[in-house]
Amino acid sequence: MNRDNGFESQRASMVDYQLRARGIESPLVLEAMGRVARERFVPRRMRDCAYDDGPLPIGAGQTISQPYIVALMTEALDLEGGEKVLDIGTGSGYAAAVLGCIAGQVFSIERVQELADRAARTLAAEGFDNVEVRCGDGTMGWPEHQPYDGIVVAAGAPAVPDSLKHQLAVGGHMVIPVGSEHSVQSLMRVTRLAEDEFRTENLGAVRFVPLLGEQGWS
């Protein structure tokens, strides 16, 4: 048996039945989801559940998102390849790895030091040298590398943080859950049309952990 112990076939099934069958169409996203070894980004004891159709706990009260949600949010960024992307809420590093298969550079921020360190080690071990992780307040973004062609936020905010909106390149998209701290949120796509002009679309109902920080929940 190969070193993947059947994970490659589980990954292929996930792409077919959880993503393609639910309307994920972007060839770049489908290819990225088929490439990233999700089992490396979950706790060792949960590897057999890595391709389950749902979120999984990763420690520190955080989760790795359901594969479909990662694909949906990545597809909504409308990337073509080679862009610069900001990823808020690194968690395990899985979504950053998926982004790293498409984007040229990914800058990822995690509030919990233990998770940031572990994600950075996993990403490096998996060969993602175009993904940089740091520990900090994701609601304030990473101004040194702005503007970003895409911003993805994997935690629910009370409102779209102004600091993130203004780190978005004109023409770029931000995907962020917005709404109540303890119930269902709306997945919003914010497009920067001009210096002070933004368009917002609702992509549907989701449920994420709260986005904590200066421009999030306290």
Image: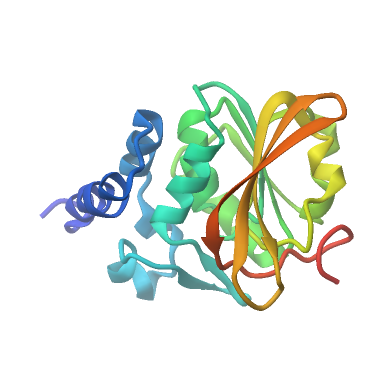
Residue at x-position 27% and y-position 47%: 15
Task: Name the one closer to the observer, 167 or 199.
Answer: 199
Instruction: Say how the picture is coloured.
Output: rainbow
Q: Using the rendered view, name the quadrant where residue 107 is placed.
A: top right
Task: Name the one closer to the observer, 118 or 209.
Answer: 209
Q: Is residue 151 visible?
A: no
State which quarter of the image contains the C terminus: bottom right
Q: Is residue 109 visible?
A: yes
Task: Name the one closer to the observer, 105 or 76.
Answer: 76
Residue at x-position 79% and y-position 30%: 146
Residue at x-position 10% and y-position 55%: 1
Q: Using the rendered view, name the quadrant where residue 41 is placed.
A: bottom left
- Which x, y percent locates residue 78? 52, 30
- Which x, y percent locates residue 202? 60, 49
- Which x, y percent locates residue 27? 34, 30
Left or right, 191 with reference to 40? right
Q: Using the rendered view, name the quadrant where residue 184 is placed.
A: bottom right
Residue at x-position 31% and y-position 42%: 34
- Which x, y percent locates residue 162? 86, 45
Residue 41 against residue 192 in the figure, above or below = below
Residue 210 against residue 192 in the figure, above or below = below
Q: Residue furthest left?
A: 1
